[in-house]
Image (cartoon, rainbow, N blue to C red):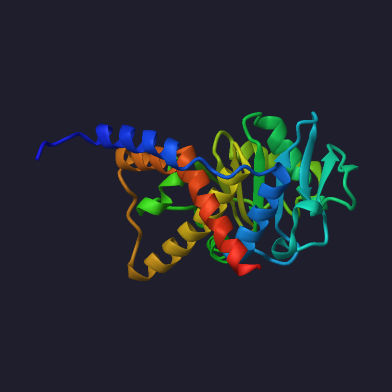
Amino acid sequence: MNFREKEYFDERATREMKEHLKGAGRTLQESLAYACKILAMTGQEAGLAGQISARSERANAYWTLRFGLGFDEATKDDFIEVDRDLHTLSGDGMANPATRFHLWVYEARPDIQSIIHTHSPYVSALVAARQPLVISQMDMTPFHNDCAFLAEWPGVPIADQEGVVISKSLGNNRSILLAHHGQLTTGNCVEEATYLSVYLERAARMQIRAQVFGPTTPLSDELASEAHDYLLKPSIVKGTFDYWCRQADRTYR
């Protein structure tokens, strides 16, 4: 058998995934509704504390779940478009006042198209202990050099100061752990922000469980970087999101 370098298999897999994992055609509101169901299905709801948003085509505006609904009951018709002062532009209802800090993240990062913030159980436990993530297993590598840590809690994020602090701490990362608070994940699409939110909660759970056996050991930078790029390929992200959507259909039918 001929030995081939890993680059060959990476290029081949990437090419074939683009062909076979095309993703479902959904509207932005449909993707947001499915994302909410996925967050609920994976245990990330915490009453009305979580938020999801996606940048609008209209300048200085975004779509978000109308305040008062839980993730598990969201439908595509429950999303409203709001401006930078949280005035409703499209749809009925009001935005969660805590989404105000999303404005600052969008302003600082033009590449970000969607934001998810949750108080998921294991992330909440990890940040209650004020611990950053240690990338010690393959499934955690999407956060290698891509998950910031805000060590001080700036308070309930309903004003501008919290947005300044969080957006600055996020920097160029896709994700951030917020000490004494929760998590924030972003993406170039709703699917990517959702994918990272689910995997960040799993990473926190893994770290907490592994600590029973002693200190966790970080992966090598080279291998973790390689895995980071592979697991964040758009075909993998969107293919995984599509699978979770099918799970959500079975769970919430």
Residue 99 x, y percent position in the rendering: 77, 48
Residue 2 x, y percent position in the rendering: 11, 36
Residue sitting farthest toward the left: 1
Compared to 233, does 206 lie above or below?
below
Residue depicted at 37% across the width and 37% down the height: 16
The reply to whether residue 84 is in sight is yes
Q: Which corner quadrant of the image does residue 60 belong to?
A: top right
Using the image as rendered, state which of residue 67 and residue 208 is in the foreground. Answer: 67
Residue depicted at 63% across the width and 51% down the height: 152
Residue 231 x, y percent position in the rendering: 42, 44
Residue depicted at 66% across the width and 48% down the height: 31
Residue sitting farthest toward the bottom: 212
Q: Tally the marks.
A: 0
Q: Is residue 158 left or right of residue 202?
A: right
Compared to 126, does 76 lie above or below?
above
Using the image as rendered, state which of residue 79 and residue 170 is in the foreground. Answer: 79
Task: Please state, as top left, top right, bottom left or bottom right, where the C terminus lies in the image.
Answer: bottom right
Q: Is residue 69 left or right of residue 239?
A: right
The reply to whether residue 43 is in sight is no
Q: Which corner quadrant of the image does residue 38 belong to?
A: bottom right
Task: Please state, as top left, top right, bottom left or bottom right, where the N terminus lies in the image.
Answer: top left
Residue depicted at 70% across the width and 35% down the height: 106
Residue 40 x, y percent position in the rendering: 64, 64
Q: Is residue 52 left or right of residue 172?
A: right
